[in-house]
Image: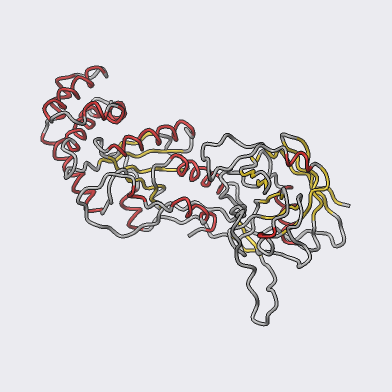
Amino acid sequence: MNKKFIGLVLLLAVVFVTAGCAGNQTGGEATPTLEPTGTSAAPAETESGGAPTQAADGQKPEPSCQVDPPLPTPNPTDEMLFAPDPEEDWIKGPEDARITIVEYGDFQCPYCAEASRNLQELMEKYPDQIRLVYRHFPLDSIHDKAVLSTQAAEAAGRQDAFWEMHDLLYAAQQEWSDLNPAAFTEWAADQAEELGLDREQFLEDMNSEQIAAEAQQAWVKGQEIGLPGTPYLKINRVFEAQPDPVLLTTFVEMIKLNDQQFNECPPMTLDEGAQYQAVLETEKGDIVIELFPETAPLAVNSFIFLAENDWFDQVTFHRVLEGFVAQTGDPSGTGYGGPGYSFGIESEPGLVFDRAGLVALANSGPETNGSQFFITYSSAPSLNGQYTIFGEVIQGMDVAESLTPRNPQENPDAPPGDLLLDVTIEKE
């Protein structure tokens, strides 16, 4: 799996089907769960991790840089099963959208109603990025009106009002879910009439043998595919995902970031003996950092490369923990984004986390340094040996300490963090 998607594995500890409706489906071949990742996970405040591995001769291996693998592509089976079909599918959103979400739903499934709201909000947030494909999977074995509500939506679709009926069925699910089938049919006809549809035509279509057969076939086909239940989401014909708004937003941001990432490691451009400083322009003021090219040449060279390519412009401080660290460097703002390449830890025995103001690269393992970095607010000996210290604040520590505290791991709805507006490199 792409290194750019490793970090989100922790976010996906809950299995996809734990929040959904399940019928008596047969199992299918396992497919990847949604794992958008960053090469730069945040340092843990209390947990310590492993030190860099040792070479066979006992010496610490020289760190190196490697390009992250490309995003995975659909296998032939998923390409065949989940590619949108304009002739058969109900589709909304731009055809050239970066992300296509295929949703299998059941109008009587309460989790599907929640998923519908979440997906609608996602499309409103990213109107140019999301294309939604809706497919029926009416769980006839557990929902008495699953097939009948599918017929209602298809009948509305015959009068060009599928999405209106789709939204209405989910929004008013509690209103109709306990009705008997005959009462539901009248209720659906009333709603169709309120939508401006021809009531008699709607009823004729809803009760037609053709639409009834199509609805029943959707149930059969879903079982043949091996769908685990509803709602079932397939992203870009590769990833399965929970319809969680935080998870889906993270995935969209990671896909967007993919267009900004680099497909090769930066060339080594440091001048021997030169001294480098970085000026971080933030919403709260400037922070000046002295860089350490002699002890962390890969980290400093990468930092300069990214700064000169505007990687850090308008990037949020996505994680600010009072008394611990302030972290930034991920344009996606999710805490999982990296530059498209990664490299190993550089450490010196005498350079440890013994004071505030040290600047280090965040990572999710010894070979996963990327673009995210943090500034310490105090000594943090538990981090020693696990993170590359590549600089120190020499001016503006008060600015760093004034950054708005936020911990999205504990509060996913935290307001946006303060912005890192620009990074300027000065050389002497």
- Give residue 23's position: percent from left, percent from top: 21, 48
Question: Which picture quadrant has residue 316?
Answer: top right
- Give residue 180's position: percent from left, percent from top: 13, 30
- Give residue 351's position: percent from left, percent from top: 77, 62
Q: Nearer the viewer, residue 80 or 178?
A: 178
Q: Residue at x 20, y 33 (%)?
A: 149
Q: Is the image coloured rainbow, by chain, by secondary structure, or in one colour?
A: secondary structure
Q: Is residue 121 above or below residue 372?
A: above
Q: Nearer the viewer, residue 390 or 301?
A: 390
Q: Is residue 263 left or right of residue 221?
A: right
Q: Residue at x 73, y 54 (%)?
A: 379
Q: Is residue 72 above or below residue 126?
A: below
Q: Is residue 203 left or right of residue 324?
A: left
Q: Is residue 267 above or below residue 374?
A: below
- Give residue 79's position: percent from left, percent from top: 35, 53
Q: Is residue 50 left or right of residue 266?
A: left
